[in-house]
Amino acid sequence: MWRSVFLHEFIDHKITNFSALPGKLTSPSFALVPSAAIVAGMNSVEITTAKGLEYILDEPLRDVIGLSCRVRVAYPIPNNGLGHLHGFPLLNFNFNASILLLSQTHPLPDLSGVKSSVGFLIGNPNQVSSAATATIRSRSFTDVRVDWHTSGQTRISVDGNLIGYNNALAPGTSFDIDRLSIGLPGEPAQPHIPQYQIARVFVRVLTRTDALVTLSRLLPEMPPGKEHNRCHLIVFANLLNLIDRLRPFMAAFHQAKSQPWTEENGPPQGPFQTDAIRAHQLAIASMLALKEMLRTGDFSNPQAFLEPFTKFLQILRASQPQQFDALAAELLAADVVPEACRELLKSELEENRGALDPIVDLLSTATKRIQEIMGGNENGGYRQTAEVR
Amino acid sequence: MADIAKLQKFASNNNFGLTSPLTHAQVVALAEHWFPEMRFFEKEKFHPISLDEDFTMIDELFGALPTSAQQQWLVSAFVREGATGVTRTFEPPVVFVPDGSAFGPGPGPGQVPRKVVRRITEGTSAREGLGDPDVNSDAVVTHGASFTRSNQFFGGITTIAGGAEASPGDPFVPRAKDDDDRPRITVMASLLNLFELLKYELLVSADDDYPPDGLRGAVEIANSLVVPAAGPQLPLSFAALRDFLLKMIEAHETNGPTPTPPLGWRLNRSAWNAVTRFTFLEYDFFYAFNDFTRYQDALFANEHEGDNEGCCLVFDRSLFTVSPNDPNALLRVIPHSMMTSVHEEFQDADKFKSVDPPVSFPPELRARDVVPFTVFIAGGSHATYFTSGTHDLVDFQDHMAQVEDHLLGAIVLAPIVVPLLILSLIIEHFTDTEDITSDDGIRTGPEEVVGEHPTAVGNRVVVMPMSADNNIYQPANEELLRLRAYAGKWGANNGIIDHSPAFRTKTARYFRKLISKL
């Protein structure tokens, strides 16, 4: 599960009423006063230069590999910024990532809203960007959403509809976040800069460790280890390193099976090939089936997990057979548990065997399926992964 | 044990009363006035019921079935019989207590012992079991721990228009009925003067023989009232904290000097001010079943029998000192703020909203006329929000603490490395989990608020008597006490991760949220 970082819904007139990871608002933020300026009963704040909100985290988020941002925004008219020529940073993460809005000038402006480029900028100092076009309404709010993952996949959505997709935006990138800002609170006021109204901001991130921790949270709860020793840290670090090895493969898959796309310019068939859609559905189905088994303790139908899991892997292999086989062989041969730690992990497995046995059985079968898929060899024949039984 | 007599005696000896300066009659008036307008998602099947209805609705429906049809709704359980355990069936609802573990009948290599329960009461007599001496915080009341069973006895099955599928504007009708057979939603309410509550909780905590009591638990407030002083952090026992706070209470009551805090600690002044200033009006919504899994394909969507959610109004109790000759005066008191409960407290997802009091409002109007109090109940999860639409499920807990404080399953399973890695990558694509609320489902609330809306249904508020003049620990309220003091779980679950809840008071949770926003 991606971790929540900051949620402000301006639910009352207090700028300090929000939820976030521990941190502090900077002093210019306190000048904002939420009010129902656009829609009755829905508070928002005005942001522009010298007006905005900045939040500094007590502990920076390290190794961010995914970012999901939602901003509910309106562009009220008349607006002094109409016709401005540079992007306005709606949401900023240091200099590492930004969501920008750039309104487009029209000879006959539509008073109901302003056609704008919604851009996402990532990377420091070598920034790359993705953009799509949408109308930011003036008398009601528009929900802008940007999702980026280190695989390179970037989605820009407006009001729940995908309007832009990039399949290779800063793949392999990770960065730290120590603050976020909405608008430009620290800058001097300037003329001809747009004013936006913001009614909601929600930021989630994925850090390098999150998925493995989440997977562990789904597994049966275990008592604290006898020793919080180096072994656990080493194994955890080894697993993370191996996941890092998998990501470039998945990035290559996304690049092969999808293409950059915008709602405005197409291509008309959309960004995703059938294989990409099918692979995504199978992956999600397998994980949900496993989750249900873990939740209920009912492992009587392992195929509910194994079937979509296997089909998902078959699609991956069909896309890049040589890379798949090489990577699978490398991972199957990987020794994530150092010799000195084997006894400790073995004893911890024994202590929790009752709860873990069905999971060990299921994942061992999944390992065999991977071996069968490798090289198209249905009978296996590759070396077995380390035995745990 | 659920020692009702002892609970009553303790309350009597300690002059129980948590609502001053209000009498119970005034509390009832206030609770009815502020009954929240509740709007449910159109596909919601389980609407709030009373604790009493958790028994009576089953009695009526199960009892009306022919014997042959009753069989499928019997509750199976593994119970002790002689030296072994056997699976037996019982009439719903059933009150169980744990009874160790046992092997099943017959030989069998590899047989492992299974947990055994002991039936206390079942069927129409189930409720009496709550007063059994063996019924403790580890007891369970269940009608079978599944959606199908809860749906049979409590789930909405017909829509307003008489259909079988709910849709916006045509939601499922609540299953509970009033005496005239009209659908009805029941909400519980409690008014709690935080100062009196803290004092009583501290007295309870000092009595090692105080029996399990589902009404208690707000003693957690005490932990928020001191913070470490500068310098090295020293340990603080709860006994030392209690002694200090009881002295603080005495000093406040007698206008005496402030006592010295325990060494290495100081009073959290804003939290203490909140205790001495505020009263909570809490509304509890009890649901027979949480079926969030039917609404979400999410990693942490869950389901469980029994569900306890709610909301709370915060009042500055100095404003309760009003003229007794003006019946409208109490109802003109504007709350300081309002809160709702959203999933687990550790997710920091609860909602808080300050109320901006109007500078003035006409004397014929009451507070509710100028301060709206509408809550939106999310489909399945029953998380309670102030706005309609979708709500991102937030979780601000410290994920890395899991790594530091727990043995991670993924580490133990590390030798089966490849599937683990692939599953981790798949998990990275589970970005969203959402609650859904809407304006198009069942709604209820004060008639003057809800009006003649086509999906409006009736309601009642069961006000917990917590006043000196009328309280739940008095003999006249013994039946209610038996239900509310029950400290066990209001549901069972066969799964590993999902847990049914005890009906824990939310006061300390609301208090922590309040002081974080002051």
Image: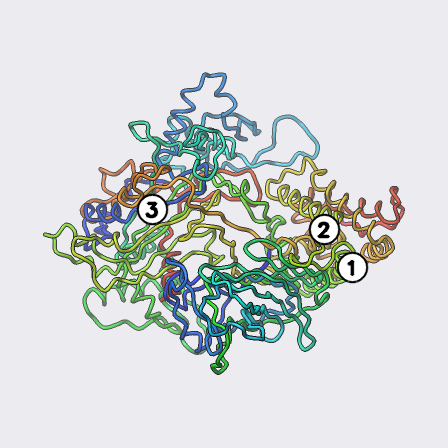
Left or right of residue B322, residue A389 in this image: right
Quadrant (top left, top right, bottom left, bottom right) of the N terminus of chain A? bottom right
Question: Which of the 4 image quarters holds residue A206?
Answer: bottom right
The chain that hosts pointer 2 is A
Q: Classify mark 3: helix, strand or loop.
A: strand
- Residue B393 location (% of width, % of height): 52, 54
- Residue A302 location (% of width, % of height): 71, 38
Q: CA distance from mark 2 to mark 3?
A: 47 Å
Q: Which residue is mark 2?
A: A269
- Residue drawn where x is 46% and y is 16% of the image: B67
Amino acid identity at mark 3: Glu
Residue A314: tell me if it is visible. yes
The chain that hosts pointer 3 is B
Q: How many marks?
A: 3
Q: Which residue is mark 3?
A: B37
Q: CA distance from mark 2 to mark 1?
A: 21 Å
Q: Is residue A65 above or below residue B174?
A: below
The crowd level at tag 1 (other Cα within 10 Å; few <14, some 14-19, many 20+) is some
Residues at discs 2 and 3 both on one chain = no
Amino acid identity at mark 2: Gln
Residues at discs 2 and 1 both on one chain = yes
The circle drawn on residue A138 is none
The crowd level at tag 3 (other Cα within 10 Å; few <14, some 14-19, many 20+) is some
Question: Which of the 4 image quarters holds residue B213?
Answer: top left
Work out whether residue A361 or residue B341 is closer to the camera in this orientation and state it. Answer: B341
Q: CA distance from mark 3 to mark 1?
A: 52 Å
Q: Which residue is mark 1?
A: A252
The chain that hosts pointer 1 is A
- Residue A87 location (% of width, % of height): 58, 73
